[in-house]
Image (cartoon, rainbow, N blue to C red):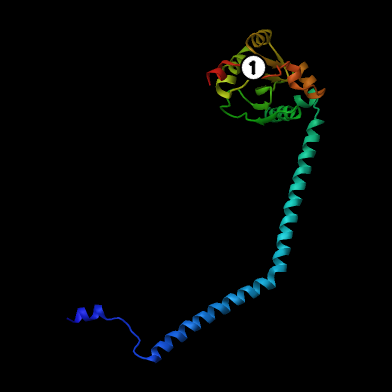
Amino acid sequence: MTARRRRSIRWRPRSTADVLGAVAVALALAVALAQAASHLLTKAAEAWPLLILIGLALAVGSAFLRIRSSRRNRADSARLARLRITLSELDAMGDQQFEYVLRDLLVRDGWAATKVGRGGDQAADVIGVLLPLGRIVVQAKHTSVGGKVGSSVMYQVKGTAGPAHKADHAVVITNGSFTRDAMAWGDRHGVHWIDRDRLDQWAHKGKPLHELLGLPSRRPRLPWRRAA
């Protein structure tokens, strides 16, 4: 009997005083909320000049960064357009520096080029793209003066350029020379080669690589692309 009574008990105002008390509490809460909102609005109104100044500062800073980046990009493009490197400078480089220079020379000629050479690179040190010529894979062979590149390099590049890198063109570039068999094999099987004399025309005299190699103006229809 007691449990039933407890569950059925609900609060009800017993007098007018209870009602007035509840109303007073509600009004007090409403007044407090209104005052808090008014205070926040007042503070926001007082701070709007500062907010505008902060917004202007951010906009000016962003514009400055964009302008500086644009100027830096134009300066880099102008520097690369004038890029000329002698054979003696190329001979003095290490392997990694030689690869970076080949990348920069491709960029100078209009290719979007990236150095990718590292362990397990599958015979690709630099990869570039230039429409409508397509995609080129470069294998760099920096040698001592008088060094020669043999046919085995040509075999390796031919085996990976299309299947591994989806390249339209493959080229081996050295500051030395190629054996007669390597040049003949490359000419028969579509692996281009740049020896010391051609490298001088490209790096020092500024002749674009695609002109030096006589690349077609359109991407060739290769077996791996037709299969894809």
* Res 177 quadrant in image: top right
Q: Residue furthest front?
A: 16
**Quick check: 32 left or right of 211?**
left
Task: Give the residue at mark 1.
Answer: 220
Residue 213 in view, yes or no: yes
State the residue in front, 202 or 197: 202
Q: Residue 90: x percent and y percent?
A: 76, 25
Residue 147 in view, yes or no: no
State the residue in front, 223 or 95: 223
* Secondary structure of the residue carrying numbered label 1: loop
Q: Residue 44: x percent and y percent?
A: 65, 71
Question: What residue sits 50% from the left and 83% below the top?
Answer: 28
Q: Residue furthest left?
A: 1
Question: Residue type at mark 1?
Answer: Pro
* Res 10 quadrant in image: bottom left
In the image, residue 58 above or below residue 164 = below
Q: Residue 62: x percent and y percent?
A: 72, 52
State the residue in front, 172 or 108: 108
In the image, residue 133 above or below residue 178 = below
